[in-house]
Image: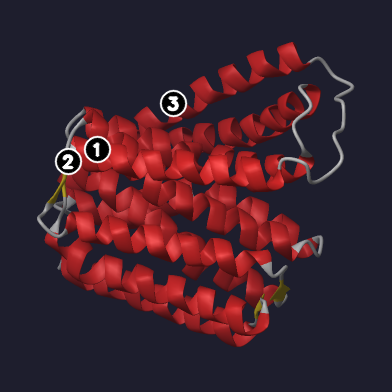
Amino acid sequence: MVKEIIIFIVGLAFLIKGSDKFVESASRVAKGFGVSEFLIALVLASVATTLPEVTVSAMAAYIGKSGIAIGNAVGSALANIALILGICSLIRPLKVEEIAWRNSLFMVAVTAYAWLLMYNGVISRLEGFSLILIYLGFLYYLYKKHVSIGEVNESRGNPKREAVIMFLSGMVVVIGAKMVVNSAVTLARAFGIPEVVIGLTLVSVGTSLPELANSLTATFKRLPNISVGNVIGANILDILMVIGIAAIIRPIQVDGSVITFTMPITMLVMLTLTSSLILGHKVDRKVGAFLMLVYSYFIYMYAQSMH
């Protein structure tokens, strides 16, 4: 038991440190090859911080633990808004650009689509493929719309060396993900806890730590657009790529509680965030307090379901 807990903690450390290194290297690679700063901030930051969720869910799907795969993706999306933006906006109200609400609205739309796919209890390979196609279309749209924005900065470093570092740090994330999934499943069985519960709580919060670190740092540095943008970008990735890739590896059996309880709460926090961004282009302390309240209720209800 102690061994499994140590493996879980070490695996999480690998996930967090590996994805942190991946962010830095990916950013330098992008600069070195002349990609705009705007796209690096909008896409690469969220791609890199969501790398743990992608690898954890892919590994979970591969070994047939679809409860963890789906629970991790949805749980991370919920934690990103209700926990991370909740904490950040309580520290300092987050005033953002007008573009934020459009991306937030897109996040709500793709989450509603994913929820629709879950209704028959299975997300098939074809449905998983459709989620990935939507994300690729989203990237293409961003590329066409924003590729000319921002200065192109040439990296002083060596982009090829950074690409190797990026690859190696990606491997560290994969190893960390494997350790987290294996130990989480063992712990779940030992305590008699359903795998979906472990995925929705322990694993999803653990793999959301890179987003928490990024958003908190951005909040303290008075860069609210990064705090909110990172979370919205990560959530779009969680819903489209994390679930999509896992479903292609192995069709996902969706636990009933995800459809009837977790998804409605996730939609509630997403709609709360989107409404706040549309009405005032900000996430204030009142909204932050409400988000934290919803997340506390979510954790409380799942704790009750374990008994």
What number is the disc on residue 124?
A: 2
Disc 2 and disc 1: Cα gap in Å?
6 Å
Query: Are dots 2 and 3 in contact, CB under 8 Å?
Result: no
Label 2 neighbour load within 10 Å: few <14, some 14-19, many 20+: many
Nearest to N terminus: mark 1 or mark 3: 3
Q: Can residue 280 be seen at all in this image of the molecule?
A: yes
Residue 193 position in % (x across, y down): 18, 54
Label 1 sits on residue: 247
For badge 3, the amino acid type reads: Val
Mark 2: amino acid: Ser
Q: Residue at x 63, y 36 (%)?
A: 20
Mark 3 surroundings: few (<14), some (14-19) or many (≥20) residues within 10 A: many
Query: Quick check: 184 above or below 216?
Result: above
Q: Are marks 1 and 3 in contact (CB under 8 Å)?
A: no
Of the two numbered discs 1 and 3 in the rendering, the one whose residue sits closer to the viewer: 1
Q: Position of residue 63 (x, y in %)?
A: 20, 28
> Which scheme is used to colour this image of the protein?
secondary structure
What quarter of the picture does the C terminus occupy? bottom left
**From the image, which quarter does the N terminus lie in?**
top left
Q: Residue furthest bottom?
A: 286
Alpha carbon separation for disc pair 2 and 3: 24 Å
In the rendered view, does 221 fall on the left or right side of 192? Answer: right
Q: Residue furthest left?
A: 120
Determine the residue positioned at 34% across, 49% down.
Answer: 72
**Residue beneath the point at 66% across and 48% down:** 145
Check disc 3 and report the residue beneath it.
174
Q: Is residue 110 left or right of residue 151?
A: left
Residue 294, picture quadrant:
bottom left
